[in-house]
Image (spheres, coloured by chain):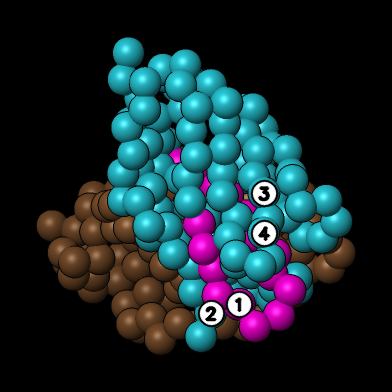
């Protein structure tokens, strides 16, 4: 069983829609991540939250808006997306200290299709 | 510059045969090294990791990897491949406490009967 839960698993949206991806973990991890993965490519880092504060934004377009309401939840708000934004969006978490830090725990992803 | 190279885009092995997937890294400090596996349409799952100590590490599903500092390599091995091992394999490097994990391009493993 995955310990990082993402919803929805699949999402189809038009370019004018507003939708959100959600991620939840109960491992006590204080770092949470959004990655974007295109077919046959490795995951690309989008955002990192550390202790509920945005730590890294990899120059992601503003049509992607992350939110970390508490230490267990991470959202990605989507607005006015483009067809090229269609991808698998992966949430991950890590511990922030000790030898467990750096080990990413991934959810199963949300498959996004933008029409 | 920090980087991870997986020289093989795809590899085909027969079921029951041995497997070695190659990974070379470039990292300024002592690296934390990882192998992740991804089945189609799924998230990534950690197979094994190396932080320090014994350079031969054991992972899940019968996989192991050996850290060779002199060669900047962290190759993944399995003595006998099963059809269910067909997947994409990513080597990755990161720093302890750091948030940026660098992934290799991945190696797609095909298993033939």
In contact (CB < 8 Å): disc 4 and disc 3: yes
- In the rendered structure, the colour chosen for chain B is cyan
In contact (CB < 8 Å): disc 1 and disc 2: yes
| Same-chain status of marks 4 and 3 | yes
Check the image and report above or below for B22 versus B79: below
Asked whether the viewer can see residue B102, the reply is no
Which is more N-terminal, label 2 or label 3? 2
User: In screen coordinates, is B69 left or right of A37?
Assistant: right
Q: Nearer the viewer, mark 3 or mark 2?
A: 3
| Same-chain status of marks 3 and 2 | yes
Question: x, y (%) of residue A49?
Answer: 63, 74
Q: Name the residue under label 2.
A: B2
Q: Residue B27 carries which label?
A: 1
Q: Name the residue under label 4.
A: B68
Give the camera-side residue of A69 and B80. B80
The chain to which mark 3 is attached is: B
* Residues at marks 1 and 3, CA–CA distance in whole angstroms: 17 Å
As helix, strand or loop, the secondary structure at mark 4 comes to strand
The residue depicted at 37 percent of the width and 57 percent of the height is: B7
């Amino acid at each position: 069983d995955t310990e990082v839960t993402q919803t929805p698993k699949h999402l189809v949206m038009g370019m004018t829609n507003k939708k959100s991806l959600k991620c939840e973990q109960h491992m006590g991890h204080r770092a949470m991540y959004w990655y974007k993965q295109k077919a046959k490519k490795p995951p690309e880092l989008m955002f990192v939250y550390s202790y509920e504060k945005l730590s890294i934004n990899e120059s992601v377009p503003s049509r992607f808006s992350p939110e970390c309401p508490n230490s267990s939840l991470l959202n990605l708000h989507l607005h006015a997306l483009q067809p090229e934004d269609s991808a698998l969006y992966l949430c991950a978490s890590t511990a922030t200290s000790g030898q467990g830090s750096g080990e990413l725990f991934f959810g199963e992803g949300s498959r996004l299709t933008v029409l | 510059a920090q980087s991870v190279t997986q020289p093989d885009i795809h590899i085909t092995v027969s079921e029951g045969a041995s497997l070695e997937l190659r990974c070379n890294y470039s990292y300024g400090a002592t690296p934390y090294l990882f192998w992740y596996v991804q089945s189609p349409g799924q998230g990534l799952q950690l197979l094994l990791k190396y932080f320090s100590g014994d350079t031969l590490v054991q992972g899940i599903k019968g996989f192991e990897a050996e850290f060779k500092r002199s060669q900047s390599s962290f190759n993944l091995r399995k003595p006998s491949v099963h059809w269910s091992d067909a997947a994409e394999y990513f080597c990755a490097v990161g720093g302890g406490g750091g948030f940026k994990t660098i992934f290799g391009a991945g190696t797609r493993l095909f298993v033939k009967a």
